[in-house]
Amino acid sequence: MQAPVKLPTHVSIIMDGNGRWAQERGKERVYGHFEGVESVRAVVEAAVEWKIPYVSFFAFSEENWGRPEAEVQTLMELMGRAMLGELDNFMEHGVRFMVLGNRDRLSDALKADIDKVMSATAANKGVTMILFLSYSGRWDILQAAEKMAHDLINQPGHPVQPEDFSRYLVTADIPDPDLLIRTSGEQRISNYLLWQTAYTEFVFTETLWPDFRKEAFRQALDEYASRDRRFGKIK
């Protein structure tokens, strides 16, 4: 499949519809999460093929901790196994793997798995794959504001620019998404990357996440390529 004509630097995806996909097939919700891992793999492989520098996934929000305990536990175990299981592929294709979010509620075992994969892939120069785990946009802004306020205490009157604040977010040094895709037909961003998506192009698709593979990804990229991005200016 030929690469899209205009590629974004950073594509981020809100992976939605795993539970509904499973329930439509008469299965437990967690079955959809297992199948959703295959969609993550397909998107990363396409990003490698098409040389998209950054691809990120909203895997688990801070609000998701309110889901049934058994489902949360299964999700956490699945993510740990999936990232370890993909390590060889990451190394083969030069993928740098990152996890961003509030680690306070993650288990020690999962944090160890995250650190292992991040450390092993840190020097890779290909696609950067980011998993947002236990993340919320409001939490990110709040923790950034606290850090910035601490640093500015000794700098009264120091003018603050938006780019200054951005350096305190967990996404510091990562370009803001050019394109945000949300699957399953929902048309909201659900407390995700609230600061970073100020000028992001949104594509909402009816496709449930476990069915979102390379062709669906290509269609979203083609939609992005048709957009005229002016960033508030006149061309």
Image (tube, grey):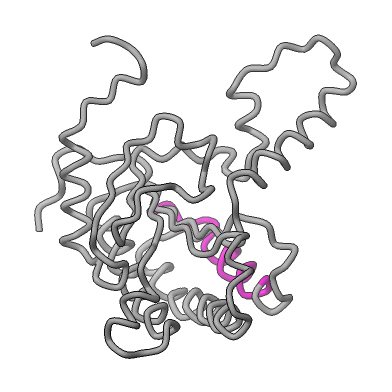
* Above/below status of 107 relative to 217: below
Main secondary structure type of the part rendered in magenta: helix
Q: Which residues are magenta?
A: 111-127
| Residue located farthest toward the right when viewing the structure as drawn | 154
Q: Which residue is located at x 55 percent, y 81 percent? A: 71
Q: Quadrant of the N terminus?
A: bottom left
Q: Position of residue 175 (x, y in %)?
A: 46, 37
Q: Position of residue 62 (x, y in %)?
A: 62, 60
Q: Which residue is located at x 62 percent, y 55 percent? A: 101
State which quadrant residue 64 falls in: bottom right
In terms of depth relative to the viewer, which is nearer, 112 or 224? 224
In the rendered structure, does residue 113 fall within the stretch colored magenta? yes
Q: Position of residue 155 (x, y in %)?
A: 85, 16
State which quadrant residue 151 falls in: top right
Q: Is residue 82 left or right of residue 11?
A: right
Q: Which residue is located at x 60 percent, y 51 percent? A: 136
In the rendered structure, does residue 157 fall within the stretch colored magenta? no
Q: Position of residue 57 (x, y in %)?
A: 44, 58
* Above/below status of 145 relative to 155: below
Q: Which residue is located at x 33 percent, y 42 percent? A: 179
